[in-house]
Image (cartoon, rainbow, N blue to C red):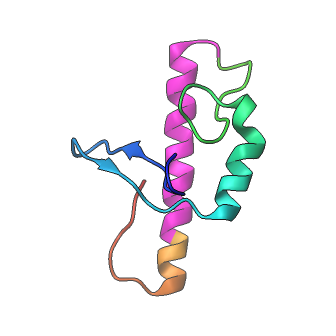
Amino acid sequence: MKKRKITYERIKTPKKARPPFVPRAEKIAGKYRSECFSDFVLPIFSGKHDTHEKKKNRMNYMCSQVNESLRRIVKLLGYDEEITW
């Protein structure tokens, strides 16, 4: 993280995205920093995710949950385009 921005690699393109990392989000991420796995901002795995398959299933589940939340937000805002994670 540099200059209040968070950097992550985009999956669909070989580019890196650098959206602003607002102070409130930075505080939340800092709270969970010691529990995170690899370079994930928030903890996504627990002790029960001990195999590659379980980690993969957890990621798929989280992705679907985030996409569902984004669909609800887009609907509330009346935005015309689909936003996905």
Q: Is residue 32 above or below residue 23?
A: above
- Residue at the (65%, 20%) spot, across then down: 49
Most common SS among magenta residues: helix
Q: Is residue 2 above or below residue 34?
A: below
- Residue at the (65%, 41%) spot, across then down: 42
Residues shaded magenta: 50-71
Q: Is residue 59 above or below residue 27?
A: above
**Front-most of residues 65 and 30:** 30
Residue 76 in picture, x, y percent from top left: 54, 83
- Residue at the (68%, 47%) spot, across then down: 29
- Please tell me whether residue 11 belongs to the stretch shown in magenta: no
Describe residue 36's horizontal placement relative to residue 75 as left or right.
Answer: right
- Please tell me whether residue 69 belongs to the stretch shown in magenta: yes
* Quarter of image, res 8: top left
**Front-most of residues 73 and 39:** 39
**Front-most of residues 62 and 32:** 32
Residue 40 in picture, x, y percent from top left: 56, 36
